[in-house]
Image (cartoon, rainbow, N blue to C red):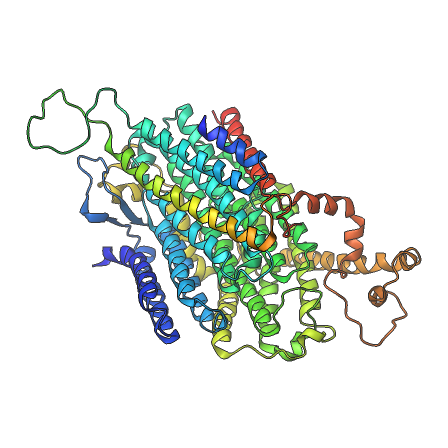
Amino acid sequence: MLIVLGIYTVVTKKNLIKTVIGLSLIDYGVNLLIVSVGFNAGGSAPIFTFNEIKPDTFFVDPVPQALTLTSIVIGACVTAMTLSLVIKIKDKYGTIDADKVRRLNG
Amino acid sequence: MMQHYPVLSIIILFLGAFLNALFGGKSSIVRNIITFLSTGTSFLLILLLIKPIMLEGKVISYWMGNWIPVSDWAIGIGLEVDQLSLFFALLVSFTVFLSGIYSFKYMENDDTLDKYYVLYLMLSGGVMGFVLSGDIFNMFVMIEIFTFAAVALTAFRNYIEGALEAAFKYIVIGSIGSSFILAGTTLLYAQLHTLNMAQIAALMHKNYTPITLFSLGLMFTGYAVKSFIVPCHAAAPDAYMTAPSSISMLFSGMVNKAGVYGMIRLLYMLFQSINLPSMQILIIILGTITMFIGVTMALIQNDFKRLLAFHSISQIGYVITGIGLSTALGITGGLYHALNHTLFKGLLFLCAGAVFYSVGTTDLNKLGGLAKKMPHTALIFLIGAFSISGLPPFNGFVSKWLIYQSAYEEGFVIVTIIALLVSVLTLASFIKVTQSVFFGQLSKECENAKEVPIGMRIPMWIMAFMCFITGILPQYVTKYLITPAVSATLNIGKYIDAMLKDGYAEKYFKETVPVPNINYKLAGYWRPEYYLILFIIILLAFTLTVLAGGIDVNRRSIVSKEIEDYKYDTFYSGEKSEYSQVGGADLFWGLKYDFRKYFNFMHSAHSGVVNDYTLWIISTAAIVIAYIFLLVP
């Protein structure tokens, strides 16, 4: 749902800042998807302990959490990079309307 | 010792980036030495791998941190180098090495060069890690690394008109592509609980669920965005045009190829048993559209580098078509064309860079008569132009021929015809470039042009030489490079065995697919009837040119009333002055006039609005996914 909302934002909104928000929404949606993949109802945290591992203890899958961490970092980079580009575009073009930032076309 | 080479060749590039960030600001000599050493060592390590992998047929696997699989279940991140990976790694390291040498001179007038080299090495390391990785999440991370570096490098010369805008479009489109790849990866993990490519391929053999098919659609679109095939190509020309030429060369030489590599791995490895002929039609249609739109858009461009960028897209169409044919011959043609594309497109971008270096513009209407001032560059450019248009004995001919032939054998006659037509149009548009940049009257801007320094000419000559070599010796090139890679693509049992343990793949993949040896006959040499066809192609190109001029003559009376401009006078009998320059935009003016509806439509479709481009990608994703669910059983 978040992904779809993000895509909708990127496709329809002409404001470049809103485009960036849309990208972040897509990213968060994917992150949520990854975490939900690894979720086991009632599982405990995947931390290695020396004591009291009972036979019926089970963990949530640790791999998706690691993936999510990586993905969050990458998402933050995307946001930072795009926002800095937006600032530069505003400096140079004087506008952040996608319809006016189209000197390269055809 | 051997199994450490792949990881070292990746790490050394990142190490170089790190050292450049620390010490590169001091002086240009330190910077150049670090860059030269790291790219050179990486290239050397990859070269050393040729003997065991390509000739002896070994597959090297390496587990990061020695996390070897426990009871056949891959846990750690694996690097794995088979013939296909090594083929692409070779392309990457070769391009990086030459481009590095070229940038020492080419970039000397820019400031903050330490950052340039940091990003440059990050880009190379990212692509290198991507092609050598055996883990789909690791591939995603590497994609993100090189996309960031590529975006930053696109905006590097931000005084060039539109560089920032191009970078913004690139990052929006690129990160949507990456999100698709990540979502696809996640869905695969949800189904199979492993990220290792070899294991996924084995587990998913003839065992598909709707979720895995959906993830195939997502990942396919993601890689299509990364390799810039139409209609996901819109950001590419902008980025190629505004980035420094040494970087444009990297874009077309390896960033594109990384997408192609991802696509091959996806189709021939992960979803190997999906009954490829059913995917064939989709891929071939995409490839053919890419070819055609790329070249027609190139015809109407007025900027040297933008034109080359559209040609780059068009050539990627050939590669994709060859791969989509899914026969051994088709893949051979596709991979051969990938190799040739790296060589001649890199060469052409370097020439464009040389022109920019000495004149300061890449606008075709302002250039002219440079052959007198820059004879070396003009000669090298001609070699590149002949190669890309597929004239024998240069390399484009061989690979294009293989693709025509395999398309014809598979019964896609229309594809063959379109591919031929595209080749003719490519030649036509390179005639236009050669005419308006290197021949004709010397323009005002070019009067002070000088030949570029020797440091820039050496990489160009090496590339030109390679173009020639791969053109006249196709049987050796295929024997030592292409055929092992094709056989690795089609027979993945060995890859899986090397990753997990011997005999693991046996229960899934029994039969091996033979790969024919490519000899002169298959490569189209010394068969008289083929030369006849070739002659017809050249004749067609010639008539097209004449036609373009001829139509102008017929329309003379109408035109001269409408347009009171003496620049069209060259086409008519009475010239105003003895020397008149035919501008780049005007040479195929007749052709453009006849098909003006199509060209106008294409022109307005590339609107430059980032929202439209995103919409194209989303529609592509929707079509691909719908196709997979409807037609793939």
Q: Residue at 19% of width from left, 25% of height from top?
A: A44
**Which residue is outermost to the left?**
A51
Give whichever of B417, B162 is nearer the camera. Answer: B162
Residue B66 position within the rendered picture, expressed as x and y whole percent measured from the top left: 18, 47
- Quarter of the image for the N terminus of chain B: give it: bottom left
Residue B445 position within the rendered picture, expressed as x and y whole percent measured from the top left: 68, 74
Horizontal relation, residue B102 to residue A46: left or right: right
Residue A22 position within the rendered picture, expressed as x and y whole percent measured from the top left: 49, 36
Q: Residue at 6% of width from left, 29% of height from top?
A: A51
Please tell me whether residue B470 is drawn above or below residue B70 in the rendered image.
below
Give whichever of B189, B521 is nearer the camera. Answer: B189
Give whichever of B279, B195 is nearer the camera. Answer: B195
Horizontal relation, residue A103 to residue B512: left or right: right
Horizontal relation, residue B475 to residue B499: left or right: right
Instruction: Please state the total of marks drawn on the protein image.
Output: 0
Please tell me whether residue B220 is drawn above or below residue B118 in the rendered image.
above
Quarter assignment of residue B73: top left
Please tell me whether residue B278 is drawn above or below residue B106 in the rendered image.
above
Is residue B574 among the parts visible in the rendering? yes
Is residue B325 among the parts visible in the rendering? no
Give whichever of A57, B92 is nearer the camera. Answer: A57
Residue B369 position within the rendered picture, expressed as x and y whole percent measured from the top left: 69, 74
